[in-house]
Image: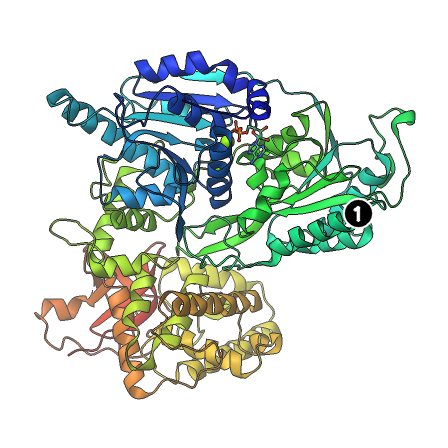
Amino acid sequence: NVNRKPEIQEARLKLPVVAEEQVIMEAIRNNTVVIICGETGSGKTTQVPQFLYEAGWSHPDSDNPGMIGVTQPRRVATVSMAKRVADELNLSDKEVSHQIRYDATVSDKTRIKFMTDGVLLREMSQDLLLTKYSTIIIDEAHERNLNTDILIGVVSRVLKLRAELSREDRQKIKPLRVIIMSATLRVADFTENKTLFPVVPPVINVNARQFPVAIHFNKKTPLDHVGEAYKKITKIHERLPNGGILVFLTGQNEINQLCKELRKRYPALPPKATKKEIVKEEKANALESKTDSTPAGKADIEDEALELGENQVEEDFDLSSDDDDDIGEGFDDDELADVKDAPLHVLPLYSMLPTEAQLRVFEPPPEGTRLCVIATNVAETSVTIPGVRYVVDCGKSKERKYDVETGVQTFEIDWTSQASAGQRAGRAGRTGPGHCYRLFSSAVFDNEFEKFSTPEIHRMPIEGVVLSMKAMNIDNVVNFPFPTPPPRENLMKAEKLLGYLGAISTTNRHITEFGRTMSLFPITPRFAKMLIIGQQHGCLPYVIAIVSALSVGDPFIQDYHLDEDQPDTDDELESRELGNITSESVAEKERRKLVRKKYYSSQMKHAGLDPSSDILKLLNVVGAYEYAGATTKFCEDNFLRPKAMEEIRKLRRQLTNLVSSNFPEIDICLDPKMPPPSAVQLKVLRQVITAGFIDSVAIRQDVLDTGGGKGLRYKNAKNVVYRLLWTDEEAFIHPGSILYSQEPPAMLVYSELYKGGKNWLKCNTAVEAK
Ligand code: ADP
Ligand code: MG
């Protein structure tokens, strides 16, 4: 019933996975879970779904009706692999379909369905038993994305459920099969985890023929990896024998820039090209600029829209690096050429590129030209480009990062792992011996690259993970079978916090509507809550500024917190301070006194707006900084760290964009300058802060003792005991707080608890007595 074209059939037979078809199908028939490991390009993604199809799986009349579902972490691979499998099987996209967030070709005829892992997770919140599927193939499991990890966990439970139900009534419901596919052999997290799979699943290793790849490191690590890549490509193209070049860069902008430069330097077609060929080439290139209509979203790994944070610039880098002389290393002299204007067929490859433009990388380049693909890490394991002999690797990638404390999500460019660099190099050895040029030194590789990348779940703040899972209707997170589980106490704490914040119901632990909205923001749930409730009275720009400042952390230089006229009796703080002072001359002491005075007057100036909150003081500073033109001078004059202020600024922009794209009904402008908040707005802001830190309440001990009465009178907060509401611990207002030198409030919320010899409450806001 399968009718493949002869040339396809011939190409398939060369794939290592095809040689293992019997072994693989046998394992799938006899086991509910099978793990397949094989080098990138060995045929896992394109062939395994076809084995099942050919054996009759997914046919309505078979013993295994229901679609063959294949999940991918990336959209690029989802769409292009669906198309490839449809072509190989000679079927339409109605039968071999894809589904990504806003685009699907699925029909009631669909037999094989490729989708992103996020799509399947969302589907499972409606149909946990996956009744439409006979098999789920989880691809690229080595990447260890949060979604993939969660998917493996949920699917392991569904397997059990489906098996039980089918024992009761085999006619009505059939058992599910799960196939996990991975590019590297690091699968112990799946096989040795008894909570995940009680019976150890068989692992099939596909032995792909991999030709040797010679690795060439740069002697120096250049600052500008795009420029360095350009130089290297030029040398390869002009001097080295035939063979495609695959270049790894970090993102869309870099890729487009390099493509433009290379196309300017080399013709795309040989001089003898016909008019027809030229027109065809121009048409094909025009596909690239067709913008992908898919809105930017949180779920996409390669989203370029939410960029934050510059590339870290290492100081010892040498701009004038010249590593080009030895390009002929590893080649015989008679193999080397010196041709200045040979045609180069330059193609980009990244997630946001329209599908038709992506698929061009699989076509052989025009006769007499050399293929040169400039890609992001999609070409690392998800997509295999034929005919590559040279790899140029910048060694970096753009990764989604999270600040574990604040939950802020950013995209940052950083070194990849040694394992990833190995994968990239391997792309040069698919069709014959190859060469990989690393645009960094071996010292950087040895000292700065991690061995493997850490699973995403361990890089994310835990309450964000839990909220995401609740949004997928996974309620029992504490006992959830993660491949590598986070500590149980942390999961329980996170659930408790989400309860306080109103993101989940405190009785049944289900997510609330409010929680669903919160889950749309790339920041910790606490701050998401503040953003959502901060929409009244035009307060949103202020809340965004507050959340940004809190996320980045205190921008004030902290050295001047203690006032000599007001010595603190706390031993720890005092001795630290005295240690400094005794070693100073009298003049120096006087100087410091002056600086301190200036510091305090600057603090008081900023607190002027509302002297009852350190957070509102922060807001004031952020506003004043913008009015002063965001200068370094302003930072110096006001004891601020310029880098922190700059980061706050960027985060404000990012969050403002996010609010306007997720909530088009909210009218919010991007003007960084804001007028000071009105009295009403200040009141709302204080409520918003209280709601966001509802789990961090402290009450004055003497007020508690008098049962909510007025309590004692104090001139300042020195030695005034507070009691933490949820843990019953004792704590004190930190001398650096604006609340320290005035009558201490009966109740406050703190946003930092500093555990020294005593518990210190930092960054506080007084809660108004009603
Ligand atoms: P794996 O999943 O093991 O990395 P794949 O199944 O993705 O391997 O790739 C197997 C082969 O199919 C590769 O040699 C690749 O070049 C080829 N291939 C994949 N997609 C296409 C396509 N759209 N056009 C031509 N060849 C393709
Ligand atoms: Mg694959």
Q: Which residue is mark 1?
A: 274
Judging depth in this view, the residue of 261 and 539 nearest the camera is 261
575 with respect to 269 (left or right): left
The answer to whether one can see residue 392 in this image is: no
- Where, quadrant-wise, is the C terminus in this rendering? bottom left
Q: Position of residue 259 (x, y in %)?
A: 71, 51
Q: Position of residue 99 (x, y in %)?
A: 39, 45
206 with respect to 14 (left or right): left
Q: Position of residue 352 (x, y in %)?
A: 53, 52
Quarter of image, res 49: top left
Judging depth in this view, the residue of 379 and 221 nearest the camera is 379
The answer to whether one can see residue 119 in this image is: yes
Q: Position of residue 46 (x, y in %)?
A: 49, 29
Judging depth in this view, the residue of 147 and 135 nearest the camera is 135
Q: Residues within 10 Å of mark 1 (few under 14, many from 20)?
A: few
Q: Residue at x 52, y 83 (%)?
A: 627
Please name the amino acid that badge 1 sits on.
Thr
Q: How many marks are shown on the rendered structure?
A: 1
Q: Secondary structure at mark 1?
A: loop
664 with respect to 496 (left or right): right
Judging depth in this view, the residue of 256 and 735 nearest the camera is 256
- Where, quadrant-wise, is the N terminus in this rendering? top left
Q: Residue at x 46, y 27 (%)?
A: 182
Quarter of image, res 69: top left
**For residue 609, above or below residue 651:** below
Mark 1 Cβ inside 8 Å of ligand 1: no
**For residue 454, above or below residue 678:** above
| Colouring convention used in this rendered image of the protein | rainbow
Q: Residue at x 61, y 30 (%)?
A: 422
